[in-house]
C-alpha cells in the first residue's frame, strides 16, 4: 500500500509540474527574451544574404522557437492571438506586401531577381518579427504578479547593461559593433579615448534609444512605489541608466529623454488632488531630476557636452568658455582619480581599438572643400579608394590607395553626422516616396544608385522619412497608427488608482513620445534590439492594462 501511495504521489507531482509548465512556459520564455535580447551582444551566427549586414543572430532562433510553441498553444486554445493592435498589425503587413509587389512589378525599383527580392522581403519579415514579440508578450501575461516579475526583470537588465558599459569605458571590456560591415561580423573590439559607450548594443544610438524606452518606466515606478526600499532601488538603477545614456554621447537620445522625463514629471504632478500639490510636486521632482542630471553631466558628460556644444561653434566666445571650463573639469577628475588610487588600465593585447567617430560615412558630394574637418571628426583618416590598374601583359588588378578626405559645405557647417542626413539620406527617402506616394519604392531601396545596385546596409536616420520612402502614405499611416492606438489605450490609465497600471501607462506614454522624437534623427523602429524591446514592452503594458478583459477571455468560467 505504501508503494502504491508513493507512486500515486509521484504521478500527482509530475502531473502538477507538467500543468504548471504548460501554463507558465510562454510567460517564462517571453520574459527571458525581453532580457536576453538587449543583454546578448550582436554576434551573428551566419549570413542570410551573402555580403549583407543583416545577419541571423541567436535571438532569431529563440524567437522562432517561441513562435512554434505559441502556435501550438493557440491550436490548443491555451492562449489568445487577439489584442488591441492585431488588426492594425495585419493591415500593415498587407501594405508591406503590396509595397513589395508594387516595387517589383509596377515601378521596378526592385529587380525580379532572388537576391533583390529576398533582401526586401527580409526587411518586411523583420518588421513582422518585431511585432510578434508584442503579440507574444501580450498573450503570455495573465496576472499582475507576472507583470511585477517583468518589471524586476527590466530593472535587472538595465542595471547589467549599465554595469557592462562601465566595464567598457574603464576596463576595456569587449565591444561588438555593427557600425560597419566588417565589424558586424562579430569582431571583438575595445573603446578608444573618444569612442562612445555602447554596452551590449551594436551602436551608441541603439543604446540611447533602448534607455529612452526603459528609463521612463523605471522613473515613474520609482516615484509611485509605496515601499521606501523599492523607491531607492528604482532611483539607483535610474541614475545608473542615466549615467550610461550620458556616456553614450547620443545627443538625439539625450534630448529625447529630457522630453520623456519632463512628461513623466508632469503626469505625476497632475495625479495630485489640488493645484497647490500639483505645482509643488512638479517643481520638487523637476529640481531633483535637474540636479541629478546636471551632476552626472558635470562629472562624466565631457563627450556629450562637446557634441551638444558643437551647435555653438559659430559663436567663438561660448565655445572657448566651454572648452576652458571642460579642461578644468578634466583636471579635477584626474586629481580625484589620483587621490582614490585609480590606475588607468592598458588596452588588451591582440585587440582592435574602436572609435565610432572614425566610422561615420564620408560624403562624396561634388562641391567639397579640403580646408578643414567637421567639428565631430577627431582624426583625419584618409579615404581608401579602389583603382583599376592594367599591367604590360594586359592583366587587370584592383588596388586600394589612400586619398585625402574632403568635406561638403554642410559637413563643415553642421558637422559630419547631420551633413550625411542633409546631403544624402533624407533626399534619397523623399525621392523614394515620390516614386509611389501611396506605397513607396519598397523596402531596402532608398540608398540604391540604380535598381540593380546591391547595398550592404540600409539607413535613413529619420524613421518617418524611411517609412514614407519605403512604404508610402499607407505604410506610414498604418505603422504609426499602431503606435497611436497604443498611446491612446495607455493614456486612459495614467490617472488610474492602481499604481502599477498608472506607472506603466506613464512610462509607456512618455517613453513612446520620447522615442518618436528620437525617430526624427535615428531609425529606431528598424534597429533590432530597440524594436524588439519597444514592441515587447508595449505588449507587456497593454496586457497589464487589459487584465480583467483578458482573464474573462481566457477563463470564461472564472470571475
Image (cartoon, rainbow, N blue to C red):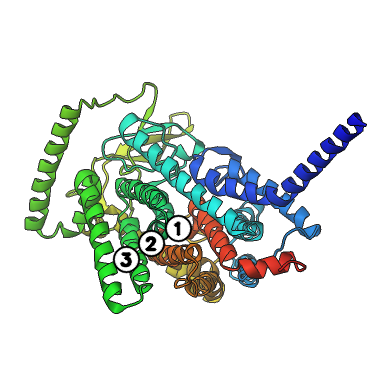
Which residue position is annotated with label 3?
Answer: 262
Q: Is residue 362 among what the camera can see?
A: yes
- Closer to the eye: label 2 or 3: 3
Marked residue nearer the N-terminal end (1 or 2): 2
Q: Nearer the viewer, residue 359 or 162?
A: 162
Label ID, residue 514: none
**Label 2 element class:** helix
Q: Residues at badges 1 and 2 in contact (C-beta under 8 Å)? A: yes
Q: Residue at x 37, y 61 (%)?
A: 521
Which residue position is annotated with label 2?
Answer: 518
Q: Is residue 465 left or right of residue 169?
A: right
Where residue 252 appears, as percent x and y from the top left, is: 33, 58
Q: Residues within 10 Å of mark 1 (few under 14, many from 20)?
A: many
**Label 3 element class:** helix
Q: Nearer the viewer, residue 213 or 441?
A: 213
Q: Residues at badges 2 and 3 in contact (C-beta under 8 Å)? A: no
Where residue 238 appears, as percent x and y from the top left, is: 36, 51
Give how far apart the Cα atoms at labels 1 and 3 are.
21 Å
Q: Residue at x 24, y 67 (%)?
A: 283
Q: Is residue 429 among what the camera can see?
A: no
- Name the quarter where the C terminus is drawn: bottom right
Q: Nearer the viewer, residue 540 or 426?
A: 540
Marked residue nearer the N-terminal end (1 or 3): 3
**In which quarter of the view is residue 409 placed?**
bottom left
**In which quarter of the view is residue 462 placed?**
bottom left
Most distant residue in the bottom direction = 275
- Name the quarter where the N terminus is drawn: top right
Label ID, residue 524: 1
Where residue 315 appears, as percent x and y from the top left, is: 10, 60
**Label 1 element class:** helix
Give how far apart the Cα atoms at labels 2 and 3 are.
15 Å
Amino acid at each position: 500500500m505504501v508503494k502504491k501511495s508513493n507512486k500515486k504521489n509521484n504521478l500527482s507531482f509530475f502531473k502538477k509540474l507538467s500543468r504548471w509548465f504548460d501554463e507558465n512556459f510562454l510567460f517564462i520564455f517571453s520574459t527571458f527574451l525581453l532580457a536576453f535580447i538587449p543583454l546578448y551582444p550582436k554576434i551573428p551566427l551566419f549570413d542570410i544574404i551573402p555580403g549583407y549586414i543583416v545577419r541571423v543572430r541567436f535571438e532569431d532562433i529563440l524567437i522562432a522557437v517561441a513562435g512554434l510553441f505559441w502556435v501550438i498553444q493557440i491550436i490548443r486554445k491555451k492562449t489568445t492571438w487577439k489584442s488591441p493592435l492585431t488588426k492594425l498589425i495585419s493591415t500593415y503587413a498587407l501594405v508591406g506586401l503590396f509595397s513589395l509587389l508594387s516595387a517589383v512589378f509596377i515601378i521596378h525599383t526592385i529587380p525580379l531577381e532572388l537576391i533583390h527580392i529576398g533582401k526586401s522581403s527580409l526587411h518586411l519579415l523583420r518588421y513582422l518579427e518585431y511585432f510578434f514579440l508584442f503579440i507574444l508578450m501580450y498573450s503570455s501575461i495573465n496576472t499582475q504578479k507576472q507583470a511585477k516579475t517583468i518589471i524586476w526583470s527590466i530593472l535587472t537588465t538595465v542595471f547589467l547593461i549599465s554595469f557592462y558599459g562601465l566595464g567598457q569605458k574603464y576596463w576595456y571590456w569587449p565591444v561588438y559593433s555593427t557600425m560597419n560591415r566588417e565589424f558586424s561580423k562579430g569582431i571583438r573590439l575595445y573603446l578608444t579615448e573618444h569612442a562612445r559607450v555602447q554596452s551590449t548594443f551594436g551602436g551608441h544610438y541603439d543604446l540611447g534609444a533602448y534607455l529612452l524606452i526603459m528609463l521612463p518606466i523605471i522613473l515613474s515606478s520609482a516615484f509611485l512605489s509605496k515601499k521606501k526600499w523599492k523607491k531607492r532601488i528604482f532611483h539607483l538603477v535610474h541614475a545608473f541608466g542615466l549615467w550610461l545614456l550620458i556616456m553614450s554621447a547620443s545627443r538625439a537620445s539625450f534630448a529625447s529623454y529630457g522630453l520623456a522625463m519632463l512628461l513623466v514629471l508632469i503626469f505625476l504632478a497632475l495625479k495630485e488632488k489640488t493645484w497647490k500639490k500639483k505645482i509643488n510636486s512638479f517643481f520638487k521632482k523637476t529640481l531633483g531630476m535637474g540636479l541629478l542630471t546636471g551632476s552626472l553631466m558635470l562629472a562624466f558628460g565631457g563627450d556629450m557636452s562637446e557634441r551638444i556644444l558643437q551647435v555653438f561653434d559659430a559663436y567663438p566666445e561660448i565655445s572657448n568658455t566651454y572648452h576652458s571650463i571642460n579642461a578644468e573639469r578634466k583636471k579635477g577628475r584626474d586629481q580625484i582619480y589620483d587621490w582614490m588610487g585609480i590606475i588607468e588600465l592598458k588596452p588588451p593585447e591582440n585587440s582592435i581599438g574602436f572609435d565610432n567617430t572614425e566610422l561615420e560615412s564620408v560624403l562624396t558630394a561634388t562641391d567639397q572643400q579640403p580646408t578643414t574637418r567637421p567639428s565631430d571628426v577627431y582624426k583625419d583618416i584618409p579615404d581608401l579608394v579602389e583603382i583599376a590598374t592594367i599591367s604590360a601583359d594586359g592583366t587587370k588588378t584592383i588596388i586600394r590607395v589612400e586619398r585625402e578626405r574632403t568635406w561638403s559645405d554642410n559637413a563643415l557647417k553642421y558637422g559630419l553626422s547631420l551633413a550625411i542626413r542633409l546631403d544624402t539620406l533624407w533626399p534619397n527617402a523623399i525621392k523614394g516616396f515620390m516614386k509611389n506616394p501611396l506605397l513607396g519604392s519598397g523596402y531596402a531601396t532608398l540608398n540604391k544608385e540604380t535598381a540593380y545596385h546591391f547595398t550592404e546596409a540600409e539607413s535613413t536616420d529619420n524613421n518617418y522619412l524611411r517609412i514614407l520612402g519605403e512604404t508610402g502614405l499607407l505604410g506610414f499611416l498604418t505603422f504609426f497608427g499602431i503606435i497611436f492606438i497604443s498611446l491612446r489605450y495607455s493614456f486612459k490609465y495614467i490617472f488610474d488608482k492602481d499604481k502599477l497600471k498608472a506607472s506603466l501607462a506613464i512610462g509607456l506614454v512618455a517613453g513612446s513620445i520620447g522615442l518618436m522624437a528620437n525617430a526624427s534623427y535615428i531609425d529606431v523602429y528598424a534597429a533590432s534590439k530597440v524594436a524588439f524591446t519597444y514592441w515587447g514592452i508595449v505588449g507587456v503594458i497593454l496586457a497589464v492594462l487589459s487584465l480583467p478583459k483578458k482573464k474573462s477571455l481566457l477563463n470564461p468560467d472564472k470571475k
